[in-house]
Image (cartoon, rainbow, N blue to C red):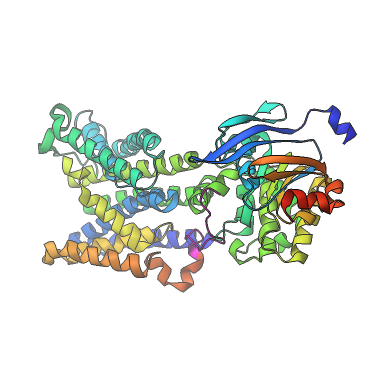
Amino acid sequence: MSQTATQPPVLSVEQIHVAYGSTAALHGISFEVHKGETVALIGANGAGKSTTLRAISGLLKLRSGAIRFEGRDIANQPPDKVVAAGIAHCPEERHVWPAMTVEENLNLGAFLCRSRAEREQRIGMAYHRFPRLRERARQLAGTLSGGEQQMLAIARALMSEPSLLMLDEPSLGLSPKMADEVFDVVRAINGHGVTVLLVEQNIYNALDVASRAYVVETGRTRAARPAAALRSDPELLRAYLGG
Amino acid sequence: MPSDSRILLTLLAAAALFPLAVHDPYVLHIAILVLFYVVLASSLNLIVGYVGEFSLGHTAFLGVGAYAAALLAQKAGWPVWATIPAAGALAAVAGGFIGAITLRLKGPYFVIVTLSFAEVLRLVANNWIAVTNGPMGLAGIPQGFLQDKRLFFYAVLAVAAVTLYLCYRFVHSNAGRGAVAVRESRFVAQSIGINPFGSAMLAFVLGAGLAGLAGGFYAHYITFVGPDIFQFSFMASMIIMVLIGGKGTLIGPIIGAAIVTLLEEYLRDMQELRLTLFGLIVMAVVLFLPNGIISLAPKLKRLRPHAPARPVSADRGVL
């Protein structure tokens, strides 16, 4: 924390407002992510956590506010430009393409990479990280188990070699054991120098991996705390999340 | 899928031997029509099956190709081997222009605007008498070295081979998989950096160019091109072929083209009833075989890696 404070943040989100049609969803979300951190956005269902990630990756337009990534303004950029800038978004509910093989899914993850040799090298890297995917390389993604599909979705997001990985509810619908495995993977990825921004409803799991956390409530960031402080202070958690 | 290419090569090889065994000009004519429709249906399938948008304006490109070949042959004296590729190229340019406008639209808006482009071109062909000869059309288009039905058969077979090769390459390219990814789940595709507009444009321009090739061939084969080429009947045939055969597959449109061409020919006695019958067939296919005839053969199941499968999780609106 102390050394990161001197460097400018990798990602800074300032007072963003987003609406679905005429329904406002975010009323001023602000937070920062520093290089090498794992930051969690926690909060109740519908607080605006996933919406925030969608706004960062350009899937939703901002009404106002600013998003800076590595010093560049990326607000309202088209999604492919955001991916090219180095942000990968692994969306909720582990959407994989069920009728494509595992390898085809991975290949598409490196869509912006024109060199075939480079793509193959990245696929090799993905298999190294996720040995189970290598076993299933020729299998259709729809036949994988839920946990395996989540691994594939994460591996696919990593295929663009992002410097920031955004994970939206990676443990949703997984057994506790499988969820633990997914969080081990997140830890390992972070250990390899990828900055991680995590959205989770499973607060205790999230606080376990994250170094810092922001509490999001009805479209606003309410508090920023080191994860350890939140974890050891159930009173504080209850106050923000209602229990 | 390698088995896809094996089937395509087998079909092409069998087609190449066909005129050696069959000499009846009527049967050859039907075979030529089948191949012509294979090209058209495969090109439409790139848009309907892979982009996932329903184009009702595909005759625009057929017509642009046909008029281009006719005018280049008649007014500029180009030989047949040059006019047909030029027809494809011009139609691809038209596809780039129309696609850049229409692919920004979705669903019914896309359907209507593509249809109106075809209709506008029909009106142009009907009224720009100095160039298109208006409703009289362009008659007596030279056939060049294609003096024999058998030569025509090989010419259209070459066009079909080029078409299937390009479709195959597209579908198995990263851009093709990108298009499928967009069709299956647009926002996930966007989240990994696929630009939906880019992959759709590529499919649209390729489909337009291939329809133009078909149009160029048609002009020389029939030796007449009129504004009718933009009419809805070609469009209806193409759609029926793609739907009956199986959209989003390489083999489906070939099956559809063969079945519908043969049915159209053999149901000729029934006249008006023919179209009614087609309507019923299409309704039955949509209701009972939404993925087309190709979905009937379970052994061929592995041939349709891109058939729309049930999504893993329910789609949740924006994300």
Q: Which of A228 and A9 is in front in this view?
A: A228
Residue at 19%, 33% (x, y): give it.
Answer: B124
Q: Main secondary structure of the magenta part?
A: loop
Q: Which of B293 and A35 is in front in this view?
A: A35
Is residue B307 within the magenta segment? yes
Q: Nearer the viewer, residue A103 or A208?
A: A208
Residue A37 in the image: x percent, y percent? 81, 41
Q: In this rendering, does residue B195 appear at all?
A: no
Q: Specify the farthest residue to the left.
A: B136
Residue at 78%, 40% (x, y): give it.
Answer: A224
Q: Specify the farthest residue to the right.
A: A2
Count of marks placed on residues: 0
- Is residue B135 shown left or right of residue A88? left
Q: In this rendering, does residue B218 appear at all?
A: yes
Dividing the picture into quadrants, the one containing residue B8 is bottom left
Q: Which of B317 and B191 is in front in this view?
A: B317
Q: Give the range drawn in magenta.
A: B303-319
Dividing the picture into quadrants, the one containing residue A95 is bottom right
- Is residue A234 shown left or right of residue A96? right
- Is residue B250 shown left or right of residue A63? left
Residue A45 in the image: x percent, y percent? 64, 53
Residue A87 in the image: x percent, y percent? 68, 39
| Above/below status of B1 relative to A82 | below
Is residue B83 within the magenta segment? no
- Is residue A107 shown left or right of residue B245? right
Residue B210 in the image: x percent, y percent? 36, 44
